[in-house]
Amino acid sequence: MNVNAPNAAHEPLDARDRPARLTVGVVGAGRVGPALAAALRLAGHRPVAVSGVSTSPYAGPPRSCPTSRSSPPPRSWPVPSSTCLTVPDDALPGLVEGLAETGAVRPGQLIVHTSGRYGTGVLAPALRAGALPLALHPAMTFTGTSVDVQRLAGCSFGVTAPEELRLAAEALVIEMGGEPEWVAEEARPLYHAALALGANHLVTLVAQSMELLRTAGVGAPDRMLGPLLGAALDNALRSGDAALTGPVARGDAGTVAAHVTELRKHAPQTVAGYLAMARTTADRALAHGLLKPELAEDLLDVLADGAGTDRAGTDGAEGDDR
């Protein structure tokens, strides 16, 4: 997978001047495919086709991948030396079967998918046709803009591949600027659930928090939350449960009851999520010795009945460390 070294008498070759090592077809011209195609192009590979097989925010060839073109369905492609499948998880099994049945897979062709949920087992139809299966999942959210390629620098990829292809899989990830992290086939669903739990639900929590702040009259909730959430994330990544703070971790049952009352009044759709996360936070704080057992009982009572307005007291600051 290594590029031939340039002549010592010449300057190092720009990626655009290197001989193409792989021709790359991308199935699924949504947010992920164009970003990976652009990253592979910068590494010296040659994206040759982008096929949109599902609803996509792109109206045509992605600007981040200028050598690509929109193509008809995969059966009409000149078969590239590698095909990258970047469709939603639930669409992947049927797509792989369709590619194999229509002869779009050739012996020795690399078939790469970017699903977090699946390992290489989902590529069995392509494997039977002689393809080489790789699962390379970037642990990153994508925006559909040029910033996506930049974010791949240092991004972890969940890598699953047959042992004989492990080095090739890791090399592709490194060429795209990522960091390979080996994930066993049987661990892929749990791995994906962990990422979804953190990243997807974080967006929901932050969006709800901004809405509540606007309702409370805060003019720039993003500016208010930015430093607080940045510090909380950094502390959590460094210290895990030891970073827990706020009224639940302190056992301030009255404050939590007041929160529930206000949420029921102004944003009842947020109550279920608040209670669920508060119960989980209380359990973890109790297990790690942060929440005193003598304070936990009243707190858990408030969370159990979902109201507790008779215990409402003075609100504590969400972000302080008391």
Image (cartoon, rainbow, N blue to C red):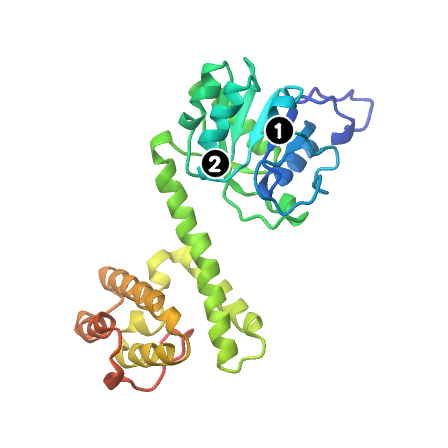
- Going from N to C along the chain, the mark reached first, 1 or 2, is 1
Picture coordinates of residue 131 (x, y %)?
51, 17
Look at label 1 and name its amino acid: Pro
Q: Nearer the viewer, residue 127 or 292?
A: 127
Query: Looking at the figure, which quarter contains the N terminus?
Result: top right
Instruction: Give me the C-alpha separation between circle 1 and circle 2.
Output: 15 Å
**Residue at image coords 50%, 29%:** 95
Closer to the eye: label 1 or 2: 1
Q: Is residue 53 above or below residue 233?
A: above
Can see residue 82? yes
Q: Which residue is mark 2?
A: 91
Q: Which residue is mark 1?
A: 73
**Residue at image coords 71%, 22%:** 20
Picture coordinates of residue 248 (x, y %)?
30, 71
**Residue at image coords 55%, 14%:** 108
Look at label 2 and name its amino acid: Ala
**Residue at image coords 53%, 28%:** 112
293 left or right of 72 in image: left
| Circle 2 crowding by C-alpha within 10 Å: few under 14, some 14–19, many from 20 | few
